[in-house]
Amino acid sequence: MSFDEEWSQVRSETVAMRLNSVPAEGGGAGGGGPTDYKVTSADLKAIGNEAQELYHWFERDAFHAGAQTDAAAKSLDGDGFQTGSAMWTMWDMWRDQAETLISACAHIHNHLEDTVTSHANHEEVLITNFSMATIDEHFK
């Protein structure tokens, strides 16, 4: 099943969805459907801030075991245990996954912050255009 097919199926299954025991707005027949969810700039900013907080926490704490892992792996290798190379394999995988998560958090934060700013700019343009249209009506 393609992503579009799966997404369409999920959307159709959520028409009667209820959130916190309250019917979804516009979810009934004739309504706008399940895509009528509203997200405010404050919501986006809060999610972006959480992503940024996770980024800083993970950046600080994800790699502190590297030096200890190096020492332990060298000691085990020196004593003839294969566990040393296994520790390096595990550490490489952990580091790659941690770097991916850190990058994703930064991307989420930056994207949501840009979305909030972009939305505010679009609102300002709409307000300005509406005001100009109203003014123009009086000069016709």
Image (tube, rainbow, N blue to C red):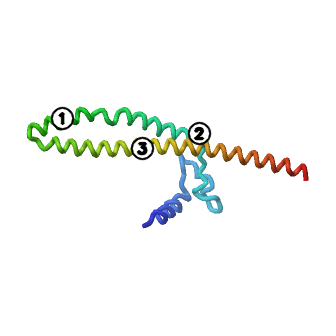
Q: Which mark is residue 81?
A: none
**Spot occupied by residue 52 in the image (x, y as percentages of width and height):** 47, 37
Q: Amino acid at mark 1?
A: Ala
Q: Earlier in the sequence, mark 3 or mark 1?
A: 1
Q: Nearer the viewer, residue 102 or 26?
A: 102
**Is disc 1 placed on a helix, strand or loop?**
helix
Tell me whether the residue at label 3 lies in contact with that at label 2, contact meaning CB atoms closer than 8 angstroms.
no
Q: Earlier in the sequence, mark 1 or mark 2?
A: 2
Q: Which mark is residue 72?
A: 1
State how far apart marks 1 and 2 are (Cα): 47 Å
Residue in the image at 67% along x and 47% along y: 122
Q: Nearer the viewer, residue 117 or 22?
A: 117
Residue labelled with disc 2: 42
State how far apart marks 3 and 2 are (Cα): 23 Å
Residue in the image at 9% along x and 37% along y: 79
Residue in the image at 11% along x and 41% along y: 81
Q: Amino acid at mark 2?
A: Ala
Q: Is residue 91 left or right of residue 78?
A: right
State how far apart marks 3 and 1 are (Cα): 28 Å
Residue in the image at 21% along x and 36% along y: 70
Snapshot quadrant of residue 123: top right
**Is disc 3 placed on a helix, strand or loop?**
helix
**Is disc 2 placed on a helix, strand or loop?**
helix
Q: Earlier in the sequence, mark 3 or mark 2?
A: 2
Residue neighbourhood size for the residue with mark 3, other residues' Cα within 10 Å, grouped as few (<14), some (14–19), many (≥20): some
Q: Amino acid at mark 3?
A: Ser
**Spot occupied by residue 8 in the image (x, y as percentages of width and height):** 51, 63
Residue neighbourhood size for the residue with mark 1, other residues' Cα within 10 Å, grouped as few (<14), some (14–19), many (≥20): some
Residue labelled with disc 3: 103
